[in-house]
Amino acid sequence: MTANVLKRRALRVEQHPSIPLYVFALAAEEVSQVADVARISRDEAGKLIGYQRPEKKQHVKQILEYLDSDEVLFPNGLILALPSNVRFKSSPGPSSSDGLCTSGTIEIPLPDTPNAPRPAWIVDGQQRSLALARTRNSRLAVTVAGFVAEDLDTQRDQFLRVNTVSPLPTNLVSELLPEVGTALPTKLSARKLPAALVEALSQDKDSPFLGLIRRASTSPDQKAEAVVADNSLMLAIQESLNLPSGVFSPYKNLASGTVDTATIRRILVVYWTAVRDTFPHAWGLPATRSRLMHGVGIRSMGRLMDRVMVNINASAPDAIEQTRGELGLISSSCHWTTGRWPDLNIPWNELQNNPRHISTLSNYLLRIYVQAKANAS
């Protein structure tokens, strides 16, 4: 190692035309000198930064116990996003390349001071990297695959792709999806629009959910107020988007592949604002105190939205007032915080976020609403 530059023998893999990919080895103690963890969080303006989940202390401890043992075999490599100022010098002579890869030396600039930002980011293997930084076996060779990409879009895209076998926490994936601009696998792509709408509901000032949605980046001091699980709301939106009878279905142009997200967002704001106004005593409370904020309440009221909002123009000046009038037809039959649900014979706090209870409560709310509409006509 020369001053402020780490040199290692490496292979440049001929794979992507514009994103260089290198394979090399680092000593365990060098990993923390080269790479940092891009922990998911939000800045003061609410912009998402990073993508990694929190440290799993028990997992790190188990890896560390093995690394500190005798005769360690550790083929589990790391994937790093490298800075654009890395340099690769191929070995002289025609034998340095076989058409698939080229041998040579990679040079990675290091920070001048211990507290300065590291040049690379860990895309996969953060728990392993934490254990490697603490092991007594500091010179253990660790295999590394590093691609040159300083933009977060590419890093997040690769992060989501390499973590499909061992699933990432659902709320972490949901929060990252709106930030990925590249083409995604079909299953992830289907979740991107609902995730983006939840993102808007979480941050927009006219949203009744402002500050109430619990996300992967929610800080510990915000969790007391963030009482709605983002995944429950995302599933409610996704269901309405996918069903032909869903209120959002008319705003999807299958021929062009476009979606009128502005109108969908407006419908969501109008409907859930009316829900908040109809049930003020149950709104904003923890799920243990209000089943309206619980997954079962969000999903069931989401299904009712398809029936209520189909005949309401969300752009009308009195749209929220109209929606409150519709929800008033069921308000006296709802028991979000006390008592028992009539006909269901279930105490308010025994409803759970599972398919059976979601279907039971949804069907009940729809039945009460349809009956009330028929009686009013």
Image (spheres, rainbow, N blue to C red):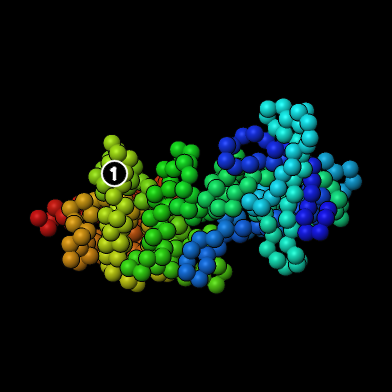
Going by the numbered disc 1, the residue's amino acid type is Lys
Q: Report the side of 72 relative to 203 (left or right).
A: right
Q: Which residue is mark 1?
A: 252
Percent x, y of residue 364: 29, 52
Residue most extreme to the right: 70
Q: Report the side of 366 relative to 287 (left or right).
A: left
Q: Give the residue drawn at x 30%, y 62%.
A: 269
Percent x, y of residue 241: 33, 46
Percent x, y of residue 276: 32, 67
Report the front residue among 225 and 194: 194
Q: Give the residue drawn at x 72%, y 44%.
A: 88
Report the front residue among 288 and 340: 288
Q: Give the residue drawn at x 37%, y 65%.
A: 204
In which quadrant is the C terminus drawn? bottom left
| Residue 358 makes an appearance in the image | no
| Quadrant of the image occupied by residue 16 | top right
Q: Give the residue drawn at x 63%, y 41%.
A: 20
Q: Report the side of 67 relative to 301 (left or right).
A: right
Percent x, y of residue 106: 74, 45
Q: Is residue 149 above or below residue 321?
A: above
Report the front residue among 55 and 123: 123
